[in-house]
Amino acid sequence: MSDTGLHSADISQLRRLGSLVDSVIVGANTTADVDFKRSCDELLSVLESATARPIRDLRSLVLAELLNDYLKSTGDQISTLRASLRQRVIDSASSALLEGLARNLERERTTATSRMRPGR
């Protein structure tokens, strides 16, 4: 696969994850509906697969790489976020972690986009 193809795949994955995080953040501030619950479940699955050892499949490996710096910086707090997602109740600490994750995903997306530009 070409570099452009690899970066496009990364960007697509980052957008999907960013949208998922946004859905949880927005849903936490509204009535807990079916979309919010589904988003919590999906994000929980993503975080669990990205932090599982050994990593079992290519998708999880890609997610682990994309989230690597963020997951290292959060340490044990990620366990708190997982518990909040499992309960589908996002408290202020988990909300702050989600907002940090959203910023990290956007930064990664911007970096991947800049790699696609000619002359880089």
Image (cartoon, rainbow, N blue to C red):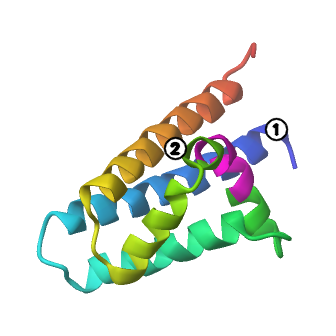
Residue 98 at x, y = what percent?
Answer: 39, 53
Q: Magenta stretch: residue 65 in it? A: yes
- For this orientation, the residue located farthest to the left is 31
Residue sitting farthest toward the front: 76
| Figure label count | 2
Distance from the alpha carbon under mark 1 to that under mark 2: 20 Å
Which image quadrant for residue 76? bottom right
Q: Residue at x 76, y 46 (%)?
A: 5
Residue 1 pos. (x, y %): 87, 50
**Which secondary structure dominates the residues rendered in magenta?**
helix
Q: Quarter of the image holding residue 109?
A: top right
Q: Which residue is mark 1?
A: 3
Q: Residues within 10 Å of mark 2 (few under 14, many from 20)?
A: many
Identify the disc placed on residue 105. Answer: 2
The three-letter code of the residue at mark 1 reads Asp
Label 1 neighbour load within 10 Å: few <14, some 14-19, many 20+: few
Judging depth in this view, the residue of 93 and 13 nearest the camera is 93
- The residue closer to the viewer here, 4 or 43, is 43
**Relative to 83, 120 lies left or right:** right
